[in-house]
Amino acid sequence: MSSHTLLEELVEIARPFASYGKVANYIPALSDQNPDDLAICIYSIDNESFYAGDHLKKFTLQSISKVIALALVLMDNGEEEVFSKVGMEPTGDPFNSIAKLETHKPSKPLNPMINAGALAVTNMIKGNTGMDKWERLIEFISHLTGENVTYNEDVAYSELQTANLNRSLCYFMKQHGVITGNVEDLLVLYTKQCAVEMNCVDLAKIGAVFANDGWDAESGKQLISRDVARICKTFMVTCGMYNNSGEFAIKVGIPAKSGVSGGIMGSVPGRCGIGIFGPALDEVGNSLAGVKLLEGLSAKYSWSIF
Ligand code: DON
């Protein structure tokens, strides 16, 4: 059986699981996504791609952007500065929880994959103005995909209007000196970052760069330093699938990062990147059919890193 046919088959096995999930609606513009959509691309580190489902359909990155922004900020600012503002430990709490910001001392977010930590990371993107910072980020993402990537204005605006929980995380962190500057400007940048839009092929390509220790075979460039790629993949394992990261590590065992749009980026070290889009989510915010699809793939190809 060809790899394309096998992938089509795995997609059809996973698709029915979407009916147990729900499309995110706390960002109003995401609520009109079709819950039955399911698409996947596998992108090898030497640039071969295989896909199944509607692989050209675009979706927004949401939390997947957190791992990309982290890579940029670590390269720009160095580990010491970044980890003085954000920790390295999983939380076991929902991605938007505020609880540990108060109870955990020092008052800094526990890791860069939860919303508080991601906001602190985005606050460290270099640039004199919000526009400079945005251009730095979108240029980096465009290099990673090899395409001219942009963002979905409706989704960004919709999140900005309703992001009061993220607003409160920012004000809390500003009070404690974790973030500096204007909170509303940070939220504009963060919501644009989360609304960066691409298809599963572009996403799998980014996963492949992480899988290849930051080296991009297409451009022949080291786009992410080896160390930073290692740190990002480690966070994907420990915190990438939120408070389901432990079960995911056992059942799938691939460094991965999810987003509430239904995207998942996977990175199989030394082999390939994986991009998935399936917007029906489980209760913690991960794509339900997407996770099932990864379980099938990991078992079939023995891709668990454990
Ligand atoms: O900040 C938020 O709530 C969204 N822009 C991203 C959250 C997200 O994707 C969590 N993912 N599972």
Image: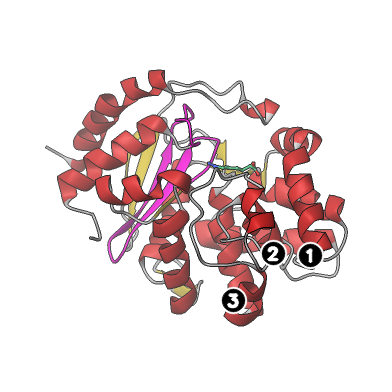
Choose the circle earlier in sequence order: 1 or 2: 2
Along the viewing direction, whichever of 283 and 140 lies nearer the viewer: 283
Along the viewing direction, whichever of 184 and 204 lies nearer the viewer: 184
Question: Residue at the location (73% across, 41% down)?
Answer: 165
143, above or below 62, in the image = below
Along the viewing direction, whichever of 196 and 248 lies nearer the viewer: 248
* Coordinates of residue 22 in the picture (x, y in percent): 50, 23
Q: Is residue 74 magenta?
A: no
Q: Is residue 149 visible?
A: no
Choose the circle earlier in sequence order: 3 or 2: 3
Quadrant including the N terminus: top left
* Coordinates of residue 225 in the picture (x, y in percent): 49, 77
Magenta residue span: 258-285
Element at label 3: helix
Res. 294 image quadrant: top left
Numbered badge on residue 75: 3
Choose the circle earlier in sequence order: 1 or 3: 3
Q: Is residue 259 magenta?
A: yes
Q: As drawn, is 151 to the left or to the right of 142?
A: right
Numbered badge on residue 176: 1
Q: Which residue is mark 2?
A: 107
Q: Nearer the viewer, mark 3 or mark 2?
A: 2
Q: Is residue 172 visible?
A: yes
